[in-house]
Amino acid sequence: MKIYLIGLTLLIGFVLTLHLAMNSQVGAIVKNPRMGNAIFWAIGACTAIIIGLTDWDPTVFTRLKEVPIWLLTAGIMGGALVFGIAWTMPQLGAGRAFVLMIAGQVISGMIFSHFGWLGSPVEPITLSKIGGAILLIAGAAIVTFAK
C-alpha cells in the first residue's frame, strides 16, 4: 500500500473532524443548526463549482445520463449526513460522535468490501476482521458511555 495514500487519508479524517465540528459550531452560534448547515453547504457548493470549472469538460453532461439516478442520491445523503452530524455533535460531543461514526464506517466498509459493492475491491470478512470490529465497537462503547 502506498504510504502517501495512508497519510492523505489520515489528513482527510482530521480535516473531516475539523470541518464537521466547525459546521456544528456555526449552527450553535446562530442557534439554528439547519440554517447554519445550509450556509455551509451553500459555500461548499460554490467551492465545488469553482473547483469543477478548473477542469471544464462539457461532455460530462452528456455522459451524466449514463449514471443511474439512484447514484445521484448520494448528494441528498451527503446533505442529510452533515445536517444530522451538525445536530448530534453538540449533544454527544465530537469524540463520541466520531467514534460512533467510525464504528459504523468500519462495519459498513467490511460489508461493502466483502461483497464488492459500488466498485470496492472484494476482501472477504475474516474472523480477525470481525475481532477488530468488535474491539472497535467496544472502544466506541467505552468512549461513548464512560464518565
Image (spheres, rainbow, N blue to C red):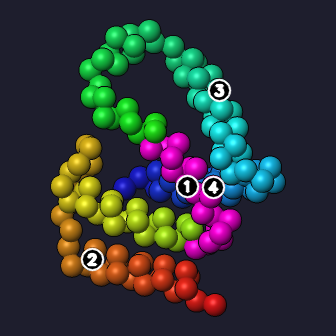
Would you say residue 18 is visible in this rendering?
Answer: no
Q: Are marks 1 and 2 in contact (CB under 8 Å)?
A: no
Q: Secondary structure at mark 4?
A: helix
Q: Which residues are magenta?
A: 77-96
- CA separation in Å, label 1 and label 2: 28 Å
- The amino acid type found where label 4 is placed reads Ala
Amino acid bearing label 2: Ile
Q: Mark 4 sits on what residue?
A: 86
Q: Earlier in the sequence, mark 2 or mark 4?
A: 4
Spatial distance from mark 3 to mark 4, Cα to Cα? 20 Å
Badge 3: residue crowd in 10 Å (few <14, some 14–19, many ≥20): few
Q: Which label is found at residue 84?
A: 1
Q: Nearer the viewer, residue 43 or 135?
A: 43
Question: At 63% from the left edge and 64% from the top edge, which residue is drawn?
Answer: 89
Mark sitting on residue 46: 3
Name the secondary structure under disc 1.
helix
Residue contact between numbered discs 3 and 2, judged by CB atoms under 8 Å: no
Q: Residue at x 31, y 29 (%)?
A: 69
